[in-house]
Amino acid sequence: MSIIKVVDGDAGGYRCEVTSKDKCDSCTFEVSVQAVQEEQQDNILEAFKRSGDAGEDAGDLDFSALLKKREKKQEGPKEEVDVWEILKAAKPCDYEKIAFQYGITDLRGMLKRLKKMKKVEPKKSDAFLRKLDSAYSVDKGKRIQLSVELTDANAQVKWLKNGQEIKPSAKYVFESVGNKRTLTINRCNLSDDAAYECVVGEEKSFTEVFVKEPPITITKLLDDVHTVVGEKVEFEVEVSEEGANVIWMKDGVELNRETAGSKYRFKKDGKRHILIINEATKEDIGMYHVFTNGGESKAELEVEDKELQVLQSIADLTVKAAEQAVFKCEVSDEKVTGKWFKDGVEVHPSNRIKMTHIGRIHKLTIDDVKPSDAGDYTFVPDGYALSLSAKLNFLEIKIDYVPRQDPPKIHLDTSGTGSKNTITVVAGNKLRLDVEITGEPAPTVCWMKGDQVLSEAEGRVRVETRKTLSSFVIEGAEKEDEGHYSITVTNPAGEDKAELFVKIVDVPNPPENVKCTSVGEDSATITWDPPAIDGGVPVKGYLMERKKIGSSRWTRLNFDVYESTTYEAKKMIEGVLYEMRVFAVNGIGVSQPSASSKPFMPIAPTSEPTRLIVDDVTDTTCALKWRPPEKIGAGGIDGYIIEYCKEGSDQWVQANEEPVSKNQYRVKGLPVGEKMLFRVVAVNIAGRSPPATLSQAITIREIMEHPKIRLPRNLRTKLISVVGEKVNLVIPFQGKPRPIVNWLKDGVPLEDKTVGTRTSEVDSILFIRSSERAHSGIYTLSVQIENMSDSADIHIQVVEKPGPPIAVHVTDVWGFNAALDWKPPKDDGNCEIIGYTIQKSDKTTKEWFTVYEHNRRPSCTVSDLVMGNEYSFRVFSENICGLSDDAGISKNTAIITKSGLDYNPAPFREKDMNRSPKFTAPLVDRSVVAGYTTAISCAVRGHPKPKIIWMKNNMIIGEDPKFLMQNNQGVLTLNIRKPSLFDGGRYSCRAINDLGQDEVECKLEVRAIQEKGQEAKK
């Protein structure tokens, strides 16, 4: 960013912003504008005079005239002066004069200190009494106000955002009260994070607003889902902010729109985020996670094979000729299709036979029933090993000659209703019982329920009578309709009567008293009481559901009917509160859910403590040690209880009143000589763990312990140490009373003073401060108590780098190959040689290059040698410590002879670099301000190096201290120190060598400084 012709209005705060995709970074800076300070230029040339009589340019400069003009000042009493205050207020051009006046010799140190002390006072604004702060911070969604105070209460202001003018709206509200101007930004979001300006005329006030985004938290957690194959699954989570981004993962793999395909759909609804699985399969089983920048939640998806349930089976029908027969069944899945069969033959639709499928209900309708329609009808759902069967009975009406005086007769057929004269009706269904009546003359029909006569009026329970048919109808059967019914028919020839029982069946009442009786780590045992009313049909079993406290989604635990009233719910999360409810199922359907159980939390007691051992036994005490249980769980451990009893008894005595937190305890007050059993139990909020019991009884008597050395695993094999390293071996042992410890080396008592030993009651230490090869050998540790002893051997091998191979020589040379041979080193470093490293060097470069590494054999063949070179070879030996420090060098060399070809290169011609001077960059005309140091420059090339001559107005510039001439590899610069109006003119540069010359020139204009007041007048 460059500002041309800076004015006062350019002062203020600026921001540079870099944006890449969804990331952004910015930085701010301030620009202060100050007026140019004019320096008074005195024509001091008039005060100079030169010695001699040759005129203006003769002799040397003589400053004596100036010295003579100075008058000796009378020194008065000196006042104490703060030099630094004077320097702060002085012009930079006067620093040297002030330093000389007050005797400051370290001018550079003075300038450094002054730079730290001097602070540039910001320029007082003409338009603003109070500007914007440098930065503001606001939380996302909150309101922020930016305000300034103006000197002119009537001045108009403009507000800019990132350089663009802001218009008033519901988002941005402008306020003007007196000389105060306020910009209010409502409901800030990330787009409001920007740079803002308040502009009054040509003056500006800058600030920057930072919008802080709070972390997105999860307010509603995911719920576990238990479903069947083919069903739609939705995982729903609610976050704290609308429009927030979340990440879905399954078993650690991210799910997104690119990778999910059509299997998964992602839905946003305000704060709710939903993951939808269109048709669940077994492959979708797993743990699903959702992440935000402030939290996470997880849930488990379980998918079981789909099982079809029959909600209503088809029933046998008995119909007459020309009537309609309807077979109806209901299954649990609306998408299931099926086929109808009659006597094993598939039924196809026709004008008289129709098959319908609406939702979960399948119907087969036969119009104008004929005798041929009688038979067994079966409905078979597609894809399921299931069939529903029923029988169609054709009622054939026979017309016989009846005398005119015929007693009445009731033809009641209840053969398809189970028990004799018992009709079963599902609550809510319609019952229509058609009873054929014969008799001449036509008999009178009377229906009764108990002692109450049923009328033929319109109603829910009514009787419909025709000439030979009387129908008993119950619309929407209810439990109150159950009871004994009778039909009586009379005529002059006699009377007939039939009784029947109408039974109303319904779904059972909900189970009662659902409660949790026990919990485990991830399970709970639930019990309940059967429903008080079974709906008139025996209860087949129960369905269970559970949910987490705080969730609204219930998870079905079983899809097959469970017959018992005790159920163990599994696959729960330890430490999470759950509640359960139960449904009762009978032949009619599923009851309403029971009342939810009281909340319960799966927490299991810990497993038994491990590794219970006896640490010490005295005449009255026994010290025990153990390790914590392998399985602790969410309940943690509150402590341990120690119990003991005599051998052969089952009466355990608690040794500690309060649970102990440590993994050791000494049981006191034990009878001397008795054999005692001990056990330890871990205790937490869920109760006692299984006990950890000693395998055998302990005799309470201080006993002798056999000496035993417990050799560490790493010392059971050879211990290899490098020369100079420290060896420190700690070997524990046991035994009572304290055993006698002895160290041997190679079967001889250890007397080497460089090898130290130290023994305590439980271990012995062997240490070598700086190992040497002489320390190699077999060290034996023996412990002894009276006539019992134990010993252990430690094999220590001290190694170092090997020596160099010997007798390295070239055995054969052919073509571009050389064969080497050598013998193993005399000193192998006290370990096996594992290889050799071979290097080559030619006599020309004498640089060594590695040819082979880890070569196992004491010989090799070096290939790809260069023709005409003579090679030497050296070999390093290698063991487990590394390469040998020195190498074995071959005594003879390998010379690769040339093939006889001659190379005749062309003679070398040296390029002539001489050339005449030529300016590659000319001088440029310049216009400068008087009193400011300036420079003009150009570039020239030529060989031999040309001589450079600078001229002003065609006059050679000599050794004038005002001018500094520089030549940096052909770049020519003429520096003019503080030019005056006298220094303007034409400047030229001439380059000369033996081959010629070249010249360039430019015009330099020196302008005088003008005061602001003079500029305004002009």
Image (cartoon, rainbow, N blue to C red):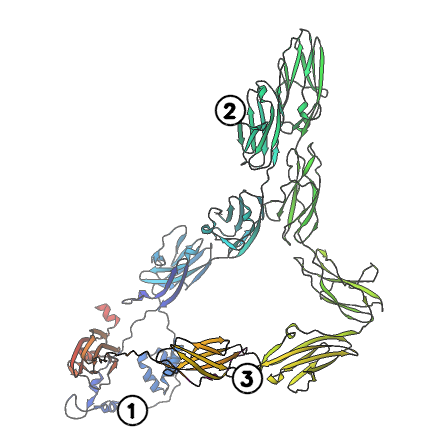
- Estimate the spatial distance between the alpha carbons at disc 1 and disc 2, rounded to whole Å: 141 Å
Q: Is residue 237 above or below residue 1002?
A: above
Q: Magenta segment: does it hold 505? A: no
Q: Closer to the observer: label 1 or label 2?
A: 2
- Estimate the spatial distance between the alpha carbons at disc 3 and disc 1, rounded to whole Å: 95 Å
Label 2, secondary structure: give it: loop
Label 1, secondary structure: give it: loop
Q: Earlier in the sequence, mark 1 or mark 2?
A: 1
Q: Is residue 624 left or right of residue 424?
A: right
Label 3, secondary structure: give it: loop
The span shown in magenta is 879-892
Q: Earlier in the sequence, mark 3 or mark 1?
A: 1
Task: Name the residue located 36 percent from the left edge and 52 percent from the top edge.
Answer: 167
| Residue 736 % position (x, y) | 77, 75
Q: What kind of secondary structure does the magenta stretch mostly adopt? A: loop
Q: Quadrant of residue 981?
A: bottom left
| Residue 444 % position (x, y) | 67, 12
Q: Magenta segment: does it hold 882? A: yes
Q: Is residue 657 visible?
A: no
Pointer 3 local density, CA inside 10 Å: few below 14, some 14–19, many at least 20: some
Q: Closer to the observer: label 3 or label 2?
A: 3
Pointer 1 local density, CA inside 10 Å: few below 14, some 14–19, many at least 20: few
Front in this rendered view, residue 762 or 768: 768
What residue is shown with label 3?
827
What residue is shown with label 1?
72
